[in-house]
Image (cartoon, grey):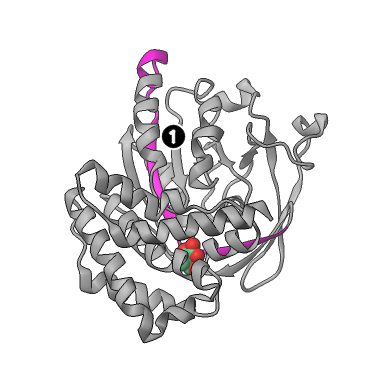
Amino acid sequence: MKPTYSSEKIAILGAGAIGQLVFHQLSRLTQGVALILRPDVTTSTHSSKSTKELEPELTFLPLSGEAEQHQARLIQADDKAALKELDLIIVCVKAYQVQGALTPLLAHLKTSCHLLLLHNGLGPHLELTPLLEGKGLHLGLNLGLSLGTTSQGAIKQAPWQVKQTGTGLTQLGHHAGTEMSASLKQLLLHAIPDSQWCSPILPMLWQKLAVNIAINPLTAILNSRNGELAKPQYRKLILALLDEVVTVAKHEGIELEKAALTERVFSVIKLTANNFSSMHQDIHHGRKTEIDAINGYLIKRAKSYGLSTPKNEEIVNKIIVLESKATAD
Ligand code: KPL
């Protein structure tokens, strides 16, 4: 018999491909998972006055098996009563959108609400931790913050339709404030295939960061699929980027093993050889990239220790040029 988790009130902030994928995975086990309409975005789906009453049917096309439909409850960002009830908000917006999307909600959350950030790259947790602690103390809040990373793949085919494009490991773990309740952890780990709770979580996020540092910008610069990076002429540059990651991580108290990291990067290149990385796609579609939260994050952390990261700086500068051309077109 399927376990039920009816008492937990969960909402997802950011109805992109990963947000909707996680929505469906949770909705298989529990009813009433909500989507919070982002306060910093108005789209045609979000702008109608009647959205408060809307409960759209979302469609999920899993990798195998029949299409599934789950009904979502939409929560407006100013619906204080609905926000106050939430036990968990899973934040699935891009790293550079986290603060803008989350800050207006914080004052309306209940004392024990928990936040889980699930985005590529790192950085928002550093801005958020003092904000949460500050807000918490001031408002008597006791929020908790968990962080995660997922290698699952999905694409959004219509505003309320996602197709799963790949399976992959999801790693979640505690970062600050109150720990997530055991029942919420259990629900997440049952709902998301191939997911694990990691303690500590930061070393896992740094390993994923290293993969993104090595693959994403290079594929955008070369205008290539991930598999191109398996060619011997790119190995030296990839190793140099990873050297800088290992050095900065060490200053953060995180030991990354260079050989294992290199093996992981080349294994991802091989396993995703036919894919276009998310940064390649951002440049291709004229969107802002996540470079600030990926190679940019490494550079920022390096500077705080007086370290230099010339290879990563070179790469970031190239992406900035590409990004400004792409977004100007
Ligand atoms: O996470 C990725 C991304 O594109 O953002 C990788 C692992 C590089 C797969 O494309």
The residue shown at (57%, 42%) is: 12
Q: Amino acid at mark 1?
A: His
Residue 131 position, x and y percent, is 39, 26
Judge: label 1 CB < 8 Å from ligand 1.
Answer: no
The residue shown at (41%, 20%) is: 135
Q: Is residue 306 left or right of residue 37?
A: left
Is residue 141 in the magenta section? yes
Location of residue 128 with respect to 111 vertically, above or below: below
The residue shown at (27%, 55%) is: 203
Location of residue 175 with respect to 50 vertically, above or below: below
- Figure quadrant of the C terminus: bottom right
Closest to the observer, 224 or 149: 224
Residue 297 position, x and y percent, is 36, 49
The residue shown at (56%, 71%) is: 276
Residue 239 position, x and y percent, is 28, 72
Q: Is residue 190 visible in the rendered structure shown here?
A: yes
Q: Is residue 142 left or right of residue 20?
A: left
Is residue 120 in the magenta section? no
- Magenta stretch in the rendered image: 136-157
